[in-house]
Image: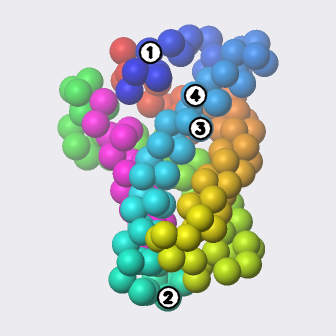
Amino acid sequence: MAQHAHHDVEAHDTHAAPAGLTRTAISATLHCLTGCAIGEVLGMVIGTALGWGDVSTIALAVVLAFFFGYALTITPVLRAGLSLGRAAKVALAADTVSILVMEIVDNGVILTVPDAMEAGLTDGLFWWTLAFALVVAFVVTVPVNRVMIGRGLGHAVVHQYHH
């Protein structure tokens, strides 16, 4: 929530300065990354610890990433006085594309690293692959969020509730 305090309203306007729009996209993507990382790491740890297969582990990680991503958006929107139903709609509009892109990229990277899905929790390969995948997902998602915010979509719909 604190990362939204420095946003400037003009950064959400389609005529905003490119640098301001990029800063806003980076901030929005960091917000998204936080929720995705919590869910992704938790899902991968649980699935790996329980000895689940790749599909089950990734499915859990994706579900948890969406859950935590939306939760991080809904909480301040609820504090702004919106009903749970309206806050959920705002979170869906603000974060769905960003989380989806991040999860596709993140899990795609993990699946391409040889033996990463077979690595155990005490194996450095498990943690390094997960960290690398989240960094790649962040880099790919920033321009997606930049375009969406520039068009008044994505994170731009939630900005008004963070003040």
Q: Please indicate, yes or no, whether residue 59 appears anywhere in the rendered image.
A: no
Q: CA distance from mark 4 to mark 1?
A: 10 Å
Mark 2 or mark 1: name the one nearer the start of the chain: 1
| Residue located 44% across and 78% down the image | 48
Residue 8 horizontal/vertical position (percent)? 56, 11
Q: Nearer the viewer, residue 47 or 82?
A: 47
Q: Disc 3 designates what residue?
A: 29
For the record, the magenta segment spans: 59-76
Assess disc 4: are there few (<14), some (14-19) or many (≥20) residues with their C-alpha within 10 Å of its C-alpha.
Answer: some
Question: Relative to 52, does residue 85 appear above or below in the rendering?
Answer: above
Mark 4 or mark 2: name the one nearer the start of the chain: 4
Task: Tell me if label 4 and label 1 are in contact, CB under 8 Å.
Answer: no
Q: Disc 2 designates what residue?
A: 53
Q: Disc 4 designates what residue?
A: 27
Q: Tell me the kind of residue under disc 2.
A: Gly
| Residue located 46% across and 21% down the image | 4
Q: Tell me the kind of residue under disc 1.
A: Ala
Mark 2 or mark 3: name the one nearer the start of the chain: 3
Mark 1 or mark 3: name the one nearer the start of the chain: 1
Q: Nearer the viewer, mark 2 or mark 3?
A: 2
Task: Tell me if label 3 and label 4 are in contact, CB under 8 Å.
Answer: yes
Q: Tell me the kind of residue under disc 3.
A: Thr
Q: Nearer the viewer, residue 64 or 85?
A: 64
| Residue located 56% across and 36% down the image | 30
